[in-house]
């Protein structure tokens, strides 16, 4: 472990880290040639543009830091998936709804802003009527199947293609909880959703493996108790509700940890069923908690819980005046000093750190078991 740590302290480049990961299956020297991704707004690279052209992330100041124009990403710049693609030497993963079918060999992104793991009917039956999209994980899997004939027309060709493909399953599931939480539904009710969400994610992973996927990376949930939106919805004068170290709402973070623990248990079961696959848990929670606990160490001098772009309030988040909804709502001068971009999503600086942590952790896990 000390050997691994010394290598990591030398800031081993992204590409080397992932090439090491690529040796897990298929032999030394094999690298990934494509990325196929599923998920929600943490991963959508532009599908929302083809679904809802009035959505907030299609207007300035979204995209201002890296792309210099809105791309549909719910961020001021790049997402974790973008940094992963860069680490593999691949172009940014193109959104499914805008693809050129002749250039899908390097991957496709099926993630949609607002997507849930469970179908919209699940929420309708429970009176949760603020679900913004019906592009659930099941719909995204159907999209993937639709491109298969163009991607590979025989089982051997598909196996060859997917052996060199990274499948990114999420983050997905966060919205299954966001919608009821933002309606202030009872946490005991929302906790009953967790096994169903995990089951939906597990089913999708198994289906991908049966179709030929060899490496599947599955992110967990972020610490939602540190989100400006959640902190605004559940603001309280009771100081006992907050973690004294981070200022985050403890009970909400415990809920996120519960989801993540159940997800990891299920991934362990799937790995046992499919011993010849690589099931990688991407610990977004721990990666993010590093900078919530030590913000200045990571350059976040503007704050961790206050949104860079928002409509005011203690955490600069206002559900009635969100970033991108009006030219009067302006972003902070330097988003790289902030963790939260718009109160729900993070800044490019935060996503970069999460991506870096995930790649480092994957590298350590590989070397500690080899």
Image (tube, grey):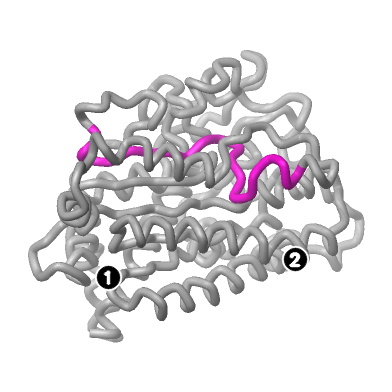
Q: Which residue of the protein is positioned furthest toward the left in this rendering?
A: 29
The numbered disc on residue 250 is 2
Q: Of callouts 2 and 1, which one flags the residue occurring earlier in the amino acid sequence? A: 1
Say left or right for 331 vs 20. right
Give the residues drawn in magenta, as a range.
104-123
Query: Residue at coordinates 85% horizontally, 41% vertically from top-left?
Result: 127
Vertically, is 13 above or below 56?
Answer: below
Which residue corresponds to the image point at 55% horizontal and 16% vertical from the top-left? Answer: 53
Q: Nearer the viewer, residue 19 or 98?
A: 98
Mark 1 sits on what residue? 8
Residue 5 is inside the magenta segment: no
Q: Quadrant of residue 169?
A: bottom left
Give residue 49's position: percent from left, percent from top: 49, 21
Is 258 on the left or on the right of 105, as rendered? right
Quadrant in which residue 90 is drawn: top left
| Secondary structure mainly formed by the magenta segment | loop
């Amino acid at each position: 472990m000390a050997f691994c740590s010394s290598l990591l302290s030398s800031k081993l480049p992204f590409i080397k880290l992932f090439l090491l990961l690529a040796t897990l299956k298929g032999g030394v020297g094999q690298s990934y040639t494509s990325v196929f991704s599923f998920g929600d707004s943490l991963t959508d690279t532009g599908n929302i543009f083809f679904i809802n052209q009035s959505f907030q992330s299609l207007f300035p100041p979204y995209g201002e830091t890296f792309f210099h124009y809105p791309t549909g990403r719910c961020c001021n710049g790049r997402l974790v998936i973008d940094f992963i693609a860069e680490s593999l030497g691949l172009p940014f993963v193109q959104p499914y709804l805008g693809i050129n079918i002749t250039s899908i060999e390097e991957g496709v992104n099926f993630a949609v802003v607002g997507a849930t793991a469970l179908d919209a009917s699940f929420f309708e039956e429970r009176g949760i009527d603020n679900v913004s999209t019906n592009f659930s994980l099941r719909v995204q899997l159907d999209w993937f199947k639709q491109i298969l004939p163009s991607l590979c027309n025989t089982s051997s060709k598909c196996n060859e293609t997917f052996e060199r493909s990274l499948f990114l399953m999420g983050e997905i599931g966060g919205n299954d909880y966001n919608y009821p939480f933002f309606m202030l539904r009872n946490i005991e009710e929302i906790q009953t959703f967790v096994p169903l969400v995990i089951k939906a994610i597990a089913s999708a992973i198994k289906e991908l493996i049966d179709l030929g996927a060899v490496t599947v990376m599955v992110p967990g949930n972020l610490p939602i108790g540190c989100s400006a939106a959640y902190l605004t919805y559940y603001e309280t004068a009771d100081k006992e509700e907050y973690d004294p170290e981070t200022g985050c709402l403890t009970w909400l973070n415990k809920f996120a940890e519960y989801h993540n623990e159940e997800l990891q248990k299920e991934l362990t079961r799937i790995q046992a069923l499919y011993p010849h696959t690589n099931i990688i848990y991407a610990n977004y929670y721990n990666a993010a908690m590093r900078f919530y606990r030590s913000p200045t160490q990571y350059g976040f001098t503007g704050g961790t819980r206050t949104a860079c772009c928002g409509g005011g309030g203690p955490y600069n988040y206002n559900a009635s005046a969100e970033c991108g909804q009006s030219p009067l709502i302006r972003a902070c001068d330097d988003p790289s000093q902030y963790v939260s971009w718009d109160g729900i999503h993070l800044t490019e600086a935060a996503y970069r750190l999460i991506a870096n942590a995930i790649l480092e952790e994957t590298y350590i896990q590989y070397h500690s078991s080899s």
